[in-house]
Image: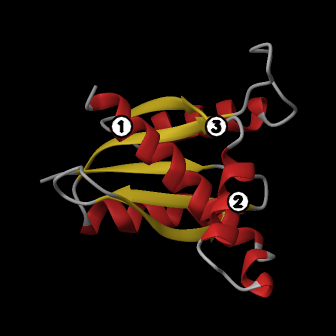
Amino acid sequence: MPRILCIDYGKKRTGLAVTDPFKIIASALTTVETKDLFSFLKKYFQQEAVELVLVGEPKNWDESDTHATPLVHQFIQKFKKDFPLMKIETVDERYTSKLASQAMVEMGMKKKDRQKKGNVDQIAATIMLQEYLKALNF
């Protein structure tokens, strides 16, 4: 059964999360240097069936774009060109980094592990994906 992949796109690093084949649980997959993202995705899509890719879209409180929004839109355009058959959607990523940081504290993660930005990116992608799954079930 195909999975759903979620991307927390960043200028330097990109966090990835994925569902189980039954689309019940979202789990952190990895963090990839953004410059290597397309080669990672190409390899991943060859190994795993993915039916949908979600990309976190940064927005301000008032729905206006942030400084990072144009980067995400550029990524989406390149993604559509490189993977034209793959379905892609955006999801709201407001507060996911803050929620990820709080979740790491609540999980009892050591301070040095919490300071690794890649961990925040993976967990932020996981939170976005879990919220998407939750919305599907309502």
Position of residue 47 measured from the top left corner of the image (x, y, whole percent)? 26, 69
Q: Name the residue nearer the viewer: 73 or 78.
A: 73
| Vertical order, 54 against 27 (above or below) | above
The residue at 28%/25% (across/down) is 138
Q: CA distance from mark 1 to mark 3?
A: 15 Å
Position of residue 113 measured from the top left corner of the image (x, y, whole percent)? 72, 83
Secondary structure of the residue carrying numbered label 2: helix
Kind of residue sitting beneath label 1: Lys
| In this view, the mark in front (1 or 3) | 1
Kind of residue sitting beneath label 3: Glu
Kind of residue sitting beneath label 2: Gln
Secondary structure of the residue carrying numbered label 3: loop
- Check the picture and name the quadrant holding the N terminus: bottom left
Q: Tag on residue 102?
A: 2
Q: Tag on residue 134?
A: 1
Q: Earlier in the sequence, mark 3 or mark 2?
A: 3
Position of residue 17 measured from the top left corner of the image (x, y, whole percent)? 46, 59
Q: CA distance from mark 1 to mark 2?
A: 20 Å
The residue to which callout 3 is attached is 93
Q: Are marks 1 and 2 in contact (CB under 8 Å)?
A: no
Q: Earlier in the sequence, mark 1 or mark 2?
A: 2
42 left or right of 70? left
| In this view, the mark in front (3 or 2) | 2
